[in-house]
């Protein structure tokens, strides 16, 4: 269930952030609570951060696959190493 843009008025915290309710097994919940306690964050903040990290990881994996597929279509002479690419990007930023 997602509540888009609602402000809660009766609870401890009011927010306009969308909310997501999830069901977790006890082991996962216990692990998330431990992380929250160790990092002094709320359980919901830990969950949000983990979800965001996974989305970023999935996006990176997608782009890596796309680049690999594009690289297969390039001839060997037009390819450059990662180090050369970084050198060229650094030169542009200067």
Image (cartoon, rainbow, N blue to C red):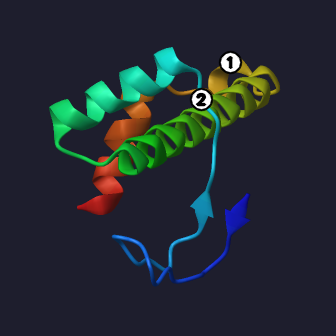
**Quarter containing the C terminus:** bottom left
The residue to which callout 2 is attached is: 24
Task: Between label 1 and label 2, give the one nearer the viewer.
Answer: 2
Element at label 2: loop
Place of residue 57 in the rendered image (x, y in percent of width and height, measured from the top left)? 54, 33
Place of residue 28 in the rendered image (x, y in percent of width and height, measured from the top left)? 49, 21
Assess disc 2: are there few (<14), some (14-19) or many (≥20) residues with their C-alpha within 10 Å of its C-alpha: few
Q: Quadrant of residue 40 in the image?
A: top left
Q: Residue at x 59, y 41 (%)?
A: 55
Instruction: Measure how far apart labels 1 and 2 are at the Cα level.
Output: 49 Å
Q: Is residue 6 visible?
A: yes
The residue to which callout 1 is attached is: 76
Q: Is residue 81 visible?
A: no
Q: Nearer the viewer, residue 93 or 46?
A: 46
Q: Residue at x 76, y 27 (%)?
A: 74
The answer to whether residue 40 is left or right of residue 17 is: left
The label shown at residue 53 is none
Q: Is residue 42 above or below residue 27?
A: below
């Amino acid at each position: 269930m997602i509540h888009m843009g609602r402000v809660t008025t009766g609870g401890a915290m009011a927010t306009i952030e969308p909310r997501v309710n999830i069901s977790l097994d006890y082991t996962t919940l216990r692990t998330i609570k431990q992380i929250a306690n160790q990092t002094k964050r709320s359980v919901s903040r830990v969950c949000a951060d983990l979800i965001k990290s996974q989305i970023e990881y999935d996006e990176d994996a997608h782009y890596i696959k796309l680049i690999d597929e594009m690289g297969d279509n390039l001839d060997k002479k037009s390819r450059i190493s990662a180090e050369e690419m970084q050198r060229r990007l650094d030169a542009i930023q200067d």
